[in-house]
Image: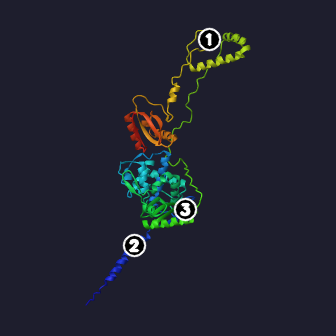
């Protein structure tokens, strides 16, 4: 007779617990590595460092670089905050966190900046990169050039948003350095990172860092980040009195744990930093090999001058009879006036040379004694401008090309820029990029209360519409200007 052994219920619980540990332990072992860095923002002095140079996944801390380049592009006149950016299918398909942009939608550049800074929206970050460089890959190359210029020696970017991608890596030290540059290089935009919420054009969005901003005294930024591979990351800055500290954490286990650790690091920084320290702002990046933006290469540069040479002037001879007739009275007058006959002769020859240059085919003179001298008056230049008309030209307009005539009363605007020089440069670069529809137009810079408008005028409605569509396809800001 077989005896059946009954296993107590508690043994079953032990087995289930063992199986659960087999699942949990590998997940714990795969936790993201931890790194931390603390600096005195005023001087850049390091106050604490742990694994600060270990290359790790930065997650959405990447958007600090995307925003830094966006601020730079606005300052350089590459794009304006009011430029309408067309959302691509690639940008619209980015996974969350996102603003919810649709393919083909148009949205002002300022709202993309707000969404990326406050909401940490991946679709907005991608749209920024594509608007500035045409593609996310090209923008990543610009990000890497900028990182190198900033001294971020152990950082490589592959995208504009920070989602996990092979080779997309940075360090706690490099991200702290980037945060310091955002703070001091573009202080007029830094307030974005302290907003608890903001209008992003399509809706109101909340700040991903609002918990630390509300809980830690003096905190006013900067950027959070999270992916499974990175863990919970944060670059934070806080100011108390004359002191400002930047603390960075990689690999937090949760939002609350990360915030608590950052608060500890900030406290440590305020204890170790001197109360008074001279502010030494970081130097702006110096780009090598064409700068951070697009480089326009002009082929077919002329190496020789095409300017026509002057027509050779035949040697001038004055008949002896004429000279004798001139010299007799001149000699008698020389004693009183002090003018020599040689001076009269040289003046006569010079006058004949001038007449010869201005009159290539003079009418023959029948009198042989005066045949060498032209008496036809010089014609007034046809393009002579009245002084009253010149005075009427407004000082706030610069015309760099002759205007077309007729019924061409339309034009296109390619942006508003902070300086006249940047507006004129934008007109030249835009004309080079789109020669087909802009050839023969009037390039004009008009001063406005908020900047300088760069306009192409003297077009028909159809040609202006075509030009705008072609420029928009090249990611160049454009809108039509009607007759006024």
Left or right for 326, reference 82 = right
Q: Label 2 crowding class (10 Å Cα cut-off): few <14, some 14-19, many 20+? A: few
Name the disc covering residue 24, or none: 2
* Nearest to the observer: residue 365 or residue 269: 269
Q: Are marks 3 and 2 in contact (CB under 8 Å)?
A: no
Up-down: is 475 above or below 63? above
Residue most extreme to the left = 1
As drawn, the residue found furthest toward the right would be 335
Asked which secondary structure carries label 2, the reply is: helix
Name which residue lies at 61% across and 14% down.
373
Q: Callout 3: 10 Å neighbours few (<14), some, many (20+)?
A: many
Where does the image place residue 61, in percent across and percent down from the top left? Answer: 46, 59
The residues tagged by marks 3 and 1 sit, at their Cα atoms, a distance apart of 92 Å
Which quadrant does the N terminus fall into?
bottom left
Question: What residue is shown with label 3?
Answer: 39
Q: Circle 3 — which element?
A: strand
Asked if residue 392 shows in the view, the reply is yes
Q: Nearer the viewer, mark 3 or mark 1?
A: 3
Secondary structure of residue under mark 1 = helix
Q: Are marks 2 and 1 in contact (CB under 8 Å)?
A: no
Residue 308, disc: none
Up/down of 318 relative to 475, above or below: above
> In x, y percent, where is residue 276?
59, 60
Name the side, left or right, on which 16 lies relative to 139.
Answer: left
Q: Position of residue 461 (x, y in %)?
A: 37, 35
Please name the residue that numbered disc 1 is placed on.
370
Label 2 to label 1: alpha-carbon separation:
115 Å
């Amino acid at each position: 007779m077989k005896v059946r052994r009954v296993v107590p219920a508690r043994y079953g619980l032990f087995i289930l617990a063992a199986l659960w540990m087999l699942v949990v332990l590998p997940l714990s072992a795969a936790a993201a590595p931890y790194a931390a860095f603390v600096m005195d923002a005023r001087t850049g002095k390091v106050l604490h460092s742990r694994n600060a140079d270990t290359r790790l996944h930065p997650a959405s801390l990447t958007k600090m670089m995307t925003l830094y380049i966006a601020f730079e592009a606005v300052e350089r006149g590459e794009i304006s905050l009011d430029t309408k950016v067309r959302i691509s299918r690639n940008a619209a398909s980015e996974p969350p966190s996102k603003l919810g942009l649709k393919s083909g939608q148009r949205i002002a550049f300022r709202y993309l900046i707000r969404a990326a800074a406050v909401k940490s929206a991946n679709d907005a970050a991608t749209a920024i990169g594509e608007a500035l460089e045409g593609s996310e890959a090209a923008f990543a190359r610009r990000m890497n050039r900028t990182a190198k210029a900033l001294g971020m020696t152990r950082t490589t970017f592959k995208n504009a948003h920070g989602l996990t991608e092979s080779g997309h890596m940075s360090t706690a030290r490099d991200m702290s350095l980037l945060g310091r540059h955002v703070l001091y290089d573009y202080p007029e935009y830094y307030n974005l990172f302290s907003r608890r919420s903001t209008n992003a054009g399509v809706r109101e969005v909340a700040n991903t860092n609002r918990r630390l901003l509300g809980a830690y005294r003096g905190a006013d930024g900067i950027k959070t980040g999270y992916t499974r591979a990175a863990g919970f990351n944060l670059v934070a800055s806080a100011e108390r009195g004359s002191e400002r500290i930047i603390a960075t954490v990689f690999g937090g286990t949760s939002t609350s744990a990360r915030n608590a650790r950052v608060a500890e690091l900030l406290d440590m920084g305020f204890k170790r930093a001197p109360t008074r320290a001279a502010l030494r702002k970081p130097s702006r990046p110096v780009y090598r090999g064409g700068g951070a933006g697009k480089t326009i290469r002009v082929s077919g540069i002329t190496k020789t001058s095409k300017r026509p040479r002057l027509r050779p002037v035949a040697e001038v001879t004055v008949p002896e009879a004429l000279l004798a007739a001139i010299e007799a009275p001149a000699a008698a007058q020389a004693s009183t006036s002090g003018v020599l006959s040689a001076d009269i002769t040289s003046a006569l020859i010079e006058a004949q040379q001038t007449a010869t240059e201005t009159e290539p085919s003079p009418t023959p003179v029948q009198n042989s004694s005066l045949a060498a001298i032209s008496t036809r008056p010089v014609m007034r230049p046809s393009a002579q401008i009245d002084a009253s008309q010149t005075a009427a030209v407004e000082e706030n307009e610069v015309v760099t090309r002759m205007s077309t005539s007729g019924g061409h009363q339309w034009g296109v605007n390619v942006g508003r820029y902070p300086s006249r020089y940047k507006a004129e440069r934008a007109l030249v670069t835009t004309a080079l990029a789109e020669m087909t529809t802009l050839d023969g137009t009037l390039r004009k810079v008009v001063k406005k209360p908020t900047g300088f408008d760069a306009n192409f005028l003297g077009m028909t409605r159809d040609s202006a519409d075509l030009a705008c569509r072609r420029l928009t396809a090249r990611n160049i800001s454009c809108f039509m200007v009607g007759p006024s």
